[in-house]
Structure formats: C-alpha cells, structure tokens
Image (spheres, grey):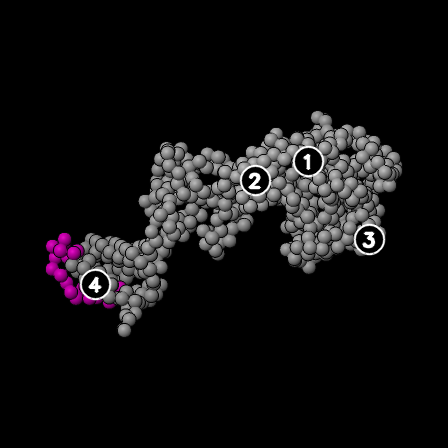
Amino acid sequence: MLRLDKRILNFVVIIALTIITFWWTFFIFHMEFEIRFVLGVIAIRMLASLLIFKDFSLSWSKATQKTFIMKSIVYIIAFCIYMPFYYGELRFAFMASELAFYLFAINFSMYSYHYLINRSKVAKTKELVIYGAGKAGMKLEEEFRESKYKVKYFVDDDKILQKRSIDAIHILSKKRLKERLAGQKLDLLIIAMPSVKKSRIKQIYEELGEYFKEIRILPSLEEILEHKDFTTQLKNISVEDLLARHPQDLDKEKIESFIKDKIVLITGAGGSIGSEISRQCKKFGAKQLILLDHSEYNLYKITEELHAPNIVSVMQNVRNYDFIEKTFKKYKPQIVIHAAAYKHVPLVEDNILEGISNNILGTKNCIDLSIKYEAEKFVLISTDKAVRPTNVMGTTKRICELYAQNANTKENTEIVAVRFGNVLGSSGSVIPKFKSQIEDGGPITVTHPDITRYFMLIPEACELVLQAASIGKGGEIFILDMGEPVKIVDLAKKMCELSGQEDIKIEFCGLRPGEKLYEELLINDSDKKTDYDSIMVASSTKYDIDKLNNDIQELLVCEDKIKKLKEIVPEFEHNNK
C-alpha cells in the first residue's frame, strides 16, 4: 500500500490553508480574489518552509511550544519577503490580516492534530492530586496522561498561582483543596517538590494525609535522575521522611576545610555510621581514605561503593594493637574517626567480655596510636546510652568518653567525642525490624508502651559529627541536638499507617536487659553552647589517666566485671532484668 510522505503533506497544508485564508480575507475586505498574488505567496511560503528550520520536516505529533514558535517565525519571514513586492498593489492591513489568520490556522491545525494523536486512550479509573505546580509537577502531569490516573487538581503554596489552572486543571491552595475534598478520599497525592525540606513533607502529610489513600513523593534533587521518567522514580513516603530534621546550621564549608586534602582513617568503616562518614569524607575531598573494619563483607561493600584510587581497605580488628599500629605507621593518618563498636544492648549483655574488649580496649588502642603517630584529630563516636547507663554497652562507651577526655595528648593531637542518639535505618535498629514485621503481616513487637528514643537521619548525624570535630580543640564531648524524643509505639503505628496496613497488631513484650524507658543526652545541665545551635558541649569529667589505665586492665581480667564497671562509672545502675 502506498504511503504518502508526511513531509509532503506539509506543502499540501500550506497550499490549502493559504487559499482558505486569502479567500476569507478577500471576502471581508470586499475585494476580488487575486489568484496570481495567492500563487506567489504559496511559492514563497513553501520555499521558506523548505529552507528555514527545515520546517517541512517538523513532526506535528511530537510538537512542542518551540515547534509553534518556529512555525510562526518561518511564515513571518516569508511575509517580510513578499510584502514589499505587493505593497502598494495591496494594502498592508490586508496582508497582515491574512498572515494573522494563517498563523492561527496552521498552529491551530497542528495543535489539534497533536492533541488528537496524543490523547490518552487509557480509561481513567483513579484520581490524583499533584502538590507542586512547578516544572516537576507539570512533567508528572504529562507523564500521567497515559495512565489510569486522572490529575484532578494541582496544589501550590504560591498565592500568585492559586486560582489559576494548567491545561484546565485548577491550581488550589491547601485550604481550598480540603474544602473541595470534604467527605472524599482520593486515590493518590504526589508531592512533586524535589527541593523541599523533609520537614515540609511532614507538614503536608499531617495536613492532607487523611484525604488520600496513598501519598508518594519525588526523590530529592540530589537523588533524582533527570533522564528517567519521574513516574518511575516516585517513592512511598517513609517514616524517615517524617522524622528527618535537617539542621539549619550545617556548615559545609567548615566541614570541607576540616577534611579536604587530609589522610583520614575510619574504623568501623563498613558499619551504618562508618560507611556514611566514609561517603562524606570522600565528598568533602579527603586526600586518602583508610577504611578499616573487621567484617570482610561490610568492608567489601563500602569499598566497592566508593571505588576510588585514593581508598585503602584494611581488614583488621581494633582490639589487636600490633596489627593496628602497622596501619598507623604505614599511612600516618591526620584524622582518625573511631566508629568501630558493638552497639546492640542485648547482645553486649550476653557477651560482656567481648563488649568490653571491643569497645573499651579498641578505643584505647586507637587513641594511644593516634597520640603516638601524631594524628591531628581523633574523633570518638559515642552514644546517648553512655549517659547514666543502665547496660554494659552504654557503660563501655562512657569509659571510652572518660579515656578520650583525660588521655595524655601531645599539642598536635586533639581528641574529641561526639554523642548522639539513634540513627534512622541503621543495621539492627527498630525501623528495619518494624518494616520486616509489617511485611510478614505482624505483629509488631514493642518493649513498653511508654518507651521513647531520639532519632536522626544517618547523613545528618554524620555531617554534624564532622562539623563538631572541626571545631573541637581537644577534651570536649559534643552533643548533637536530636530534637524531641519519639514514642516507639507511635512510631510503630505511623509505619503501619504508611504501609496501608493499619490493622496490624502491636504487642508489648517487656523491656530487655539493660534497656531504659527514656534515653538522655546530658549527664547534668552544665552543657555549653557552641557557635552552632545543633551542637552543644558537655561538661568535662576528670579522671586520673594512670588510674583509668589500671582500671581498664583490671576490668579485662577480673571475675566480677559488673562490679568493676560500677567502680569506674559510679552512675551505672545495671538493669539486667
């Protein structure tokens, strides 16, 4: 079957529309139809279409706003060519009127063809609202045209846009949307604001969540892939999105000046905190990264992820002084960030000697070697469980803090500790556990109805760790502002709600050995402010370093380790029931 080249159809359209527009213009100007003049204009228009922008080959079904502009330019140029030849013979008003009618006719024809060819053939069975009428929102609306979803409204906070529309889809304020949806529950809300802070996402969720069966969001600008359809990148709103805090005083220039062009050793580099600190150090321009971890798999994962010629992977255990010393001697790190520790309270309760030797002896080894090999800065990652501890893990971390504060440092070795609470999504933490229980259909197990914890996103915590370390002069314990504590049972309910499985049962299984109802970040109220609201400094605790060294040696060999721990940390009240 013979197919006519659609590019030739362009010239057929030019001929047909030119005849129609001139016939009408001659008619309204009460003039005789001048076929010679019309044929001349057709010839010039066809020549312009052939030579300018290759207009004759433009696809109407793929037309954009730019296509309409290009077509207008082509025929305005043609007008500028033929108008002087006929000016005087025909009135300028006549030729300008015909041109305006022709531009309208050809662009209207092309737009109508584009609409008819591209109109959705999918039955619209669901309704959605897009929050954000910017470029991201408009791109999503375009992509959803070929889906079962009908975009019912846009929502935007910009008052200038409110009460306007995009392709006949109204742009509303939040208040107006609530009024229109009173008594209704639409299928989907998409938050199409990739640059917005997570605190804003939380606010939108809390205000509009009850009006939608599902809420999805675009990733952040850093995560979004522009070459892929936005609809394929939408993700469910998560509890991390709702709990994220985004410190307002994050000083990336300060962090960069601290890390850039330095040799950085990170212990526990394959763990949740260590791996994120490794990423941050790479991002902020470390000269060389020494990634140290005793887990082969974790070390492999972070090494493969970062994959750079300036990264060295060292598979060692921080308890082995001689092996660790070889690493210090070989690489001479300028900054040491000590994230290697056993952190799970129940496991350490069941493995006290391992917890003591790994956490205390490992930290002591790294501090002593940092001093011996004159590292500029040693940074200890500590925990809120070190404050008035009720478990062995927290007590070991408190002893690490005491050693960091009282070690005999040389002038060029500054030792600081940074204390913070739980991080969202770390290995073995409550959120991955709850997610797994929800996927299995429940029940969710919570230890106590009143138990609370502080939470922060891992990237936020790690950036603040580096910022605190950059301002430390030695001997400080920095405390990160963790915001308000979160009730764990409320967290469990929220995760059920977000998963769409609000009927999952929550069971209370009782506090585990060493577990507290409430965590604290301060031992007393004598903390000091720093230049940053998100970072405070705890008051120092003096402890004779020679006595502390002797106490640690005794702790490693004595029979009653709990008694010795209480002797070193008098505020330790062991809750092992």
Name the residue tied to disc 1: 512
* Of callouts 1 and 4, the N-terminal one: 4
Q: Position of residue 485 (x, y in %)?
A: 61, 32
Of circles 4 and 2, the one toward us is 2
Judge whether residue 318 is colored magenta. Answer: no
* Of callouts 3 and 2, the N-terminal one: 3
Q: Name the quadrant of the N terminus.
A: bottom left
Name the residue tied to disc 2: 443
Amino acid type, residue under disc 2 in the picture: Pro
Instruction: Label 3, secondary structure: give it.
Output: helix
Of circles 3 and 2, the one toward us is 2
The residue lying at 42 percent from left, 39 percent from top is: 212
Q: Position of residue 459 (x, y in %)?
A: 62, 44
Instruction: Label 4, secondary structure: give it.
Output: helix
Q: Quadrant of residue 478?
A: top right
Region of the chain picked out in magenta, as a range: 24-48
Instruction: Label 2, secondary structure: give it.
Output: loop
Q: Quadrant of residue 430?
A: top right
CA separation in Å, label 1 and label 4 = 85 Å
For this rendering, which residue is in front, 329 or 577? 577
Of circles 1 and 2, the one toward us is 2
CA separation in Å, label 3 and label 1 = 36 Å
Name the residue tied to disc 3: 323
The residue lying at 83 percent from left, 34 percent from top is: 564
* Drawn side of residue 445 relative to residue 501, left or right: right
* Of callouts 1 and 2, the N-terminal one: 2
Q: Is residue 14 above or below residue 184?
A: below
Name the residue tied to disc 4: 16
